[in-house]
């Protein structure tokens, strides 16, 4: 199995729990990974600290890149990162990606992923959505991105916030092509 090269973008949108659970799951899936690069927006760390009460994003065994580091490998298509996941994805970041505004490493990496026809997964968390948001989602979908709203499922009977967030994260990891052990609808049930 070819190991994956993944970029994780974390914006300042509410929903840091999704980013935390994604990073936790990537640690668990380490055998399937070649490398993971993490880039955070200016507000992402503040929102993480406010929502989760810590700065544990600093402790993950992945390389973190400054948002202005255009020398990061995934700022170029030649580095062959095949997947980028932005979680949570703010509507501002989504708009910049949709309109090709590559003003920082996160939007540049997303632009590279799209131009190389690789997998860009944007985990939006905002609600309600304006027509502008929907149009940006339409543009991105037409460009090849996958919009995966952070809409948790309940059929696995999650018992806490992390279990609930994991229903979204595992779906995203499925979309990214990872092999993982997760709850699957109707599997193992008697008919």
Image (cartoon, rainbow, N blue to C red):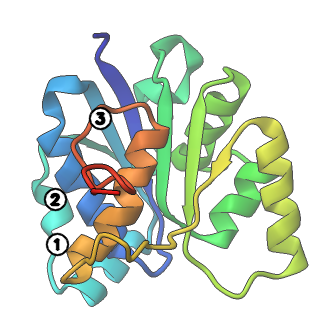
- The answer to whether any part of residue 16 appears in the image is yes
Residue 8 falls left or right of residue 50: right
Q: Which is more toward the observer, 57 or 156? A: 156
Mark sitting on residue 55: 1
Residue at the image point whose x is 24% and y is 50% from the top: 188
In this rendering, the answer to whether 165 lies above or below 128 is above
- Position of the N terminus, as image quadrant, is top left
Mark 3 or mark 2, earlier in chain: 3
> Circle 1 sits in a helix, a strand or a loop, which is it?
loop
Marks 3 and 2 sit apart, C-alpha to C-alpha, by 14 Å
Residue 106 screen position, x and y as percent: 53, 48
- Circle on res. 36: 3
Residue at the extreme front of the image, as rendered: 191
Q: Which mark is residue 148?
A: none
Report which residue position mark 2 lands on.
Answer: 58
What residue do we see at 74% from left, 36% from top?
A: 144
Q: Residue at x 14, y 25 (%)?
A: 31
Q: CA distance from mark 1 to mark 3?
A: 19 Å
Residue 170 in the image: state x and y as whole percent: 35, 53
Q: Which of marks 3 and 1 precedes in the sequence?
A: 3
Label 1 neighbour load within 10 Å: few <14, some 14-19, many 20+ = few
Q: Are marks 1 and 2 in contact (CB under 8 Å)?
A: yes
Q: Residue at x 16, y 59 (%)?
A: 58
Element marked by disc 3: strand
Residue closer to the observer: 131 or 108 = 131
């Amino acid at each position: 199995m070819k190991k994956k090269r993944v970029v994780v973008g974390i914006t300042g949108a509410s929903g840091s729990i999704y980013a935390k659970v994604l990073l936790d799951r990537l640690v668990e899936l380490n055998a399937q990974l070649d490398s993971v690069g993490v880039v955070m927006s200016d507000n992402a760390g503040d929102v993480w600290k406010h929502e989760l009460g810590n700065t544990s994003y600093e402790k993950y065994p992945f390389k973190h890149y400054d948002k202005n580091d255009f020398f990061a490998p995934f700022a170029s298509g030649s580095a062959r990162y095949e997947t980028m996941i932005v979680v949570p994805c703010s509507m501002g970041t989504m708009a910049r990606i949709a309109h090709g505004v590559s003003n920082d490493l996160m939007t540049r990496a997303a632009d590279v992923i799209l131009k190389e026809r690789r997998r860009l997964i944007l985990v939006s968390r905002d609600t309600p959505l304006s027509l502008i948001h929907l149009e940006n989602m339409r543009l991105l979908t037409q460009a090849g991105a996958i919009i995966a709203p952070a809409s948790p499922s309940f059929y696995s009977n999650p018992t806490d916030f992390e279990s609930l967030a994991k229903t979204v994260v595992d779906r995203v990891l499925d979309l990214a092509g990872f092999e993982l052990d997760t709850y699957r609808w109707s599997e193992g049930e008697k008919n």
